[in-house]
Amino acid sequence: MGSRHSKIILNLTGSPRDISHLANGRFLKAFGAKAGRWTHLSHVFYDTPDRELETQGITLRLTEGDGEIRQRVTRQSPGAMRIENHMAVLTPGARVFSATGSGEIDAAIRDCGALSPVYRITYDRWRAVIRYRVSKIEVTIDLGEAEVWRHGRRINRGPVNTLALKMAKGEREDLFDFARLLTESAGVRLSPQSKRDQARALAAGAQILIGKMPTLSLTGDETAGDVLRAAIGLVAERITALPPGAIDGRDPYALYQLRVALRRFRAIERTYRPFLTGKKLRRLAKRARIVGKMLGPARDWDVFIDETIPEITAGGDAPESLSMLTAAAGGARAAAWADARDTLNTAEFHAFLIDLNEYALAPFKKKDLKGALSKPVRDFAPIALDRQRKRAVKTVRRTDQSTTDGRHRVRLALKKLRYSVQLFKSLYPKEIRSPYMTAMRETQDAYGELNDAHCAKELAHEAAAGADAKRAAGFVAGYVSVADHEAAAKTAHFWRRLEAMTPFWRADDFSVS
C-alpha cells in the first residue's frame, strides 16, 4: 500500500519557449536523446477550504495518466528531517482517499472536514534518457497549466513549465555537472519549486511565497553530522527559492530574505568549521559572502527610501528639499537593483546554487569529518556554541567601539553568535532559552540602530547633488544622529547584561534529555 524511498531530482525552470525548445531542439540530441515520449497527465490536490491538511504538513494528490489513477500522500513537518511518502494505485470507482497504513496520517485525513480539489495541474510531459559521461540521466519536461480552486470554483490559473533531471544510472556528480551545463547553455535555472508550489504561489496571487525560513525540529538523538546536512539542505532550498522574487518581481523582501539566508549558511559553516577536515563547505561560504556583498547596496537603498525617509517625513520638520534628495536616492536605488539582478543572473551565481545543493545532497566522506560529528547533537551543541560565544566575547572586549568600524565589527560578531544559537534552539524548551535569546536580540538591535544611522548619513550625502539636496542631506544626518546617540547609550548596558548571563545551553537546571 505505502512505499518510502529517497531519490535526487533536480528541478529547473525557465521560459516556456526555452523549456519547450529543449524537447525539440538539438541540445539534448547531442547527448543521445532519441525521440522522447509525450504523455498527458493531471494532478488534483485535495484539502479542506481552510487548508487543514496543509497546516499539518500533509499533501493528498491523485494523478491520472497512462490509464490509471495513483494516490500519493506525503507528510513533512516544518524543519523535519524525514518525509513520509505513501503511494497506491486506486481501482476504478475508488473513493478519493484510500488508507495509507500510517495511523497518524489516516486519522488526520479522516478527522478533517470535507475534502475538495484545491489545485488542479494539467500538463503534457516529454521524457527521454540522455548519456552524460558515464551516466544515464532521465530528462522530464512538463508544459501545462496550474489552477487554483475554492468551493468548487476556479479562482486563478497560470503556466507550468519545468525541467527535471533524475539519475537513471551512474554517478551523482554527472547529474549536477549536466545541470551546470544546462544553466550555462539552455537559458534555465535551478528551482526548488514543484508544480504544487507554483500552484500555491498562484493561490497567494504572487510569484513566490516568502515566509520565515523554517528551523530544524531536533530531538537531540540526531548526530551532529546529520543536523549539519539537514541545516544546509534547508538553507540551500531557501537560497534557491528567493532569487526569482528579486529578479522578476524586484521584491525588497525577497532580496532581504536572500541576504539573511546567505548569512545563515555562512553561520552554519562557521559553527561546524572546527569539526570538518574538508574545505569544500568553507569555499562555498566564501562564495556566499561575495554574493551577499554584491546585493548589499540594493538593500541599503531600500532601507533608506522605504524606512528612514518616511520616518523623517513623519516628524513634520523635514525641509521641502527632502523630496529632491529622495528622487536622487531613487535613481541610486534603481542602479543598485540593476546590479543586484545582474549578480543573480550570472553563470557564477547559478553554478553556486548547483554546488550548494550538491553539497546538501551528497553523503559525507569519512575523511571530511572529525569525531565530534558522530556525537548526538545534544552533546555537540554546547561545545560548538561555547566556541562561538567565546569568539564573540573576545571580539567585543578587544574592539575599540568609539569608531564606526569598531561598532560594526561588534555588531557582526553578535549576529554570528545569534545565528549559531538559532541553529540548535529547538533542543531547548522555550522557557529555558527565551531570556538569553531576548537579550541577544536586544543587544544586536541596539548595535543595528547604530549601523543604520551611519549608513543613512553616508547614503544621504552620496545621493545629494546640488545645494538644496545637500541641505536635506545635512538634515538627515542631524536627525539620525539623535538616534545614533540614543542607541550608543543602550549598547553598553545591553552587552553587560548579556555577558553576565549564563547561556541556556549551560544552565545547571537543564540538560537535553
Image (cartoon, grey):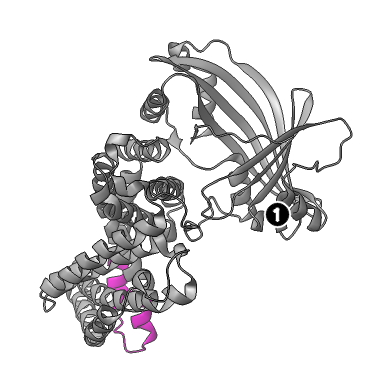
Tag 1 secondary structure: helix
Front residue of 317/168: it is 168
The correct choice, above or below, for 486 with respect to 398 in the image is below
User: Quick one: label 1, few (<14), some, or many (20+) residues within 10 Å?
Assistant: many
Q: In which quarter of the image is residue 424?
A: bottom left
Q: Quadrant of residue 511?
A: bottom left
Question: What type of secondary structure mainly makes up the magenta span?
Answer: helix
Residue 329 covered by magenta stretch: yes
Place of residue 319 in the rendered image (x, y in percent of width and height, measured from the top left): 29, 84
Place of residue 167 in the rendered image (x, y in percent of width and height, measured from the top left): 49, 24
Residue 77 covered by magenta stretch: no
Front residue of 130/215: it is 215
Is residue 128 in view? yes
The magenta segment is 308-330
Quadrant (top left, top right, bottom left, bottom right) of the N terminus = top right
Q: On the rendered structure, is 466 left or right of 189? A: left
Q: Which residue is drawn at 51% across and 13% down?
A: 33
Place of residue 458 in the rendered image (x, y in percent of width and height, measured from the top left): 19, 70
Q: Quadrant of residue 361?
A: top left
Q: Residue at x 44, y 32 (%)?
A: 188
Which amino acid is tagged 1? Answer: Leu
The correct choice, above or below, for 455 with respect to 370 in the image is below
The correct choice, above or below, for 253 with respect to 66 in the image is below
Q: Name the residue under label 1.
A: 53
Is residue 464 in view? no
